[in-house]
Image: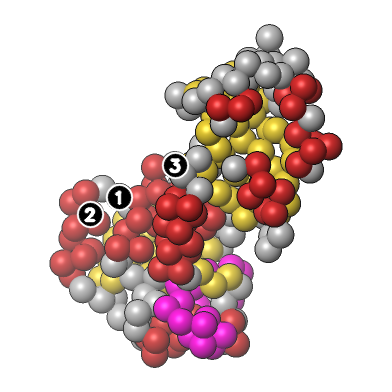
Amino acid sequence: MEKKQNVNLSSLGFLRALRHKNRQFAVIGLGRFGRAVCESLHKLGYEVLGTDIEEKRVAAVLTNQIASHAVQLDSTEPFALKEAGIFEFDTVIIAIGNYLQESIITTLSVKEAGVPYVVAKASTEIHGKLLKRVGADHVVFPEFEAGCALARSLTRPSILEHFDLDPEHSIVEIIVPEEFHHKTIAELQLRSRFGISVLAVGSENKFEINPNPNLRLWKGAVMVVIGNNKNIDQLV
């Protein structure tokens, strides 16, 4: 039997945009989104520098130890960014999407300073286009993505996690439906019937990767599948 491994799709929707070879990140803006990014990266073992114009937010990050370092600064001032060493980071996440002018000025400053990879939070589609225009390498829409995730959870309760590979294909973590109970992957013919492939099967965060086609599924277990979104919708 193959050794079971842990699988966790959490945060992939955002973290897939970050370069895995990097070990240091700077996060500008320590609101709810910025703090969540800092905490997630910090827990994954990366070195994170958090910055915000409000001293109270910086102090909270340091007190809760959700970043390696945190400093107060005005990100619209290029000299302040340089003094804090922001321009030396390979990846900078600009998490001040609710302040359009500050967001755009900060994005422009870090890109003009030569930061290789900049991720910026946008609050509207127009804001996102402007961020792209001034050099953002990747733009995220947290509120929109959260809304989509909520809609999926309400209409597709069997879907636990959802990771978009591109507009048409996804990796999805779903609960094994009752009609699949005690049937093998081979018997279900998921690839020929639905056009999807099973990447892992398990429960309680312990999964068998690349499961044997003769593995029998059980109701309530979790399986991770990859395929076309329309085909996945038919499955669930």
Residue 179 among those drawn in magenta:
no
Dot 2 amino acid type: Leu
Q: State how many labels appear.
A: 3
Contact, mark 2 vs mark 1 (Cβ under 8 Å) = no
Q: Which mark is residue 66?
A: 1
Q: Residue at x 53, y 23 (%)?
A: 219
Which mark, by number, is residue 45? 3
Q: Kindly identify the residue that appears in the image at 55 percent across and 27 percent down.
A: 178
Residue 223 visible in the shown view: yes
Q: Is residue 19 above or below residue 98?
A: above
Q: Which label's residue is closer to the chain start, 3 or 2? A: 3
**Residue 123 among those drawn in magenta:** yes
Mark 2 neighbour class, 10 Å CA radius: few under 14, some 14 to 19, many 20 or more: some
Q: Which residue is mark 2?
A: 62
Q: Secondary structure at mark 1?
A: loop
Residue 87 x/y as whole percent: 49, 72
> Residue 99, percent across and down?
34, 83
Provide the residue span drawn in magenta. Answer: 108-130
Three-letter code, disc 1: Ile
In this rendering, would 79 be left or right of 190? Answer: left
Residue 134 vs residue 198, the one in the foreground = 198
Q: CA distance from mark 3 to mark 2?
A: 16 Å
Q: In the rendering, at what x and y percent does residue 231 appear?
A: 71, 49
Q: Which mark is residue 8?
A: none
Indicate the secondary structure of the residue bearing disc 2. Answer: helix
Q: Is residue 215 left or right of residue 10?
A: right
**In percent of the image, x 23 and y 64: which residue is there?**
58
Q: Residue furthest front?
A: 179
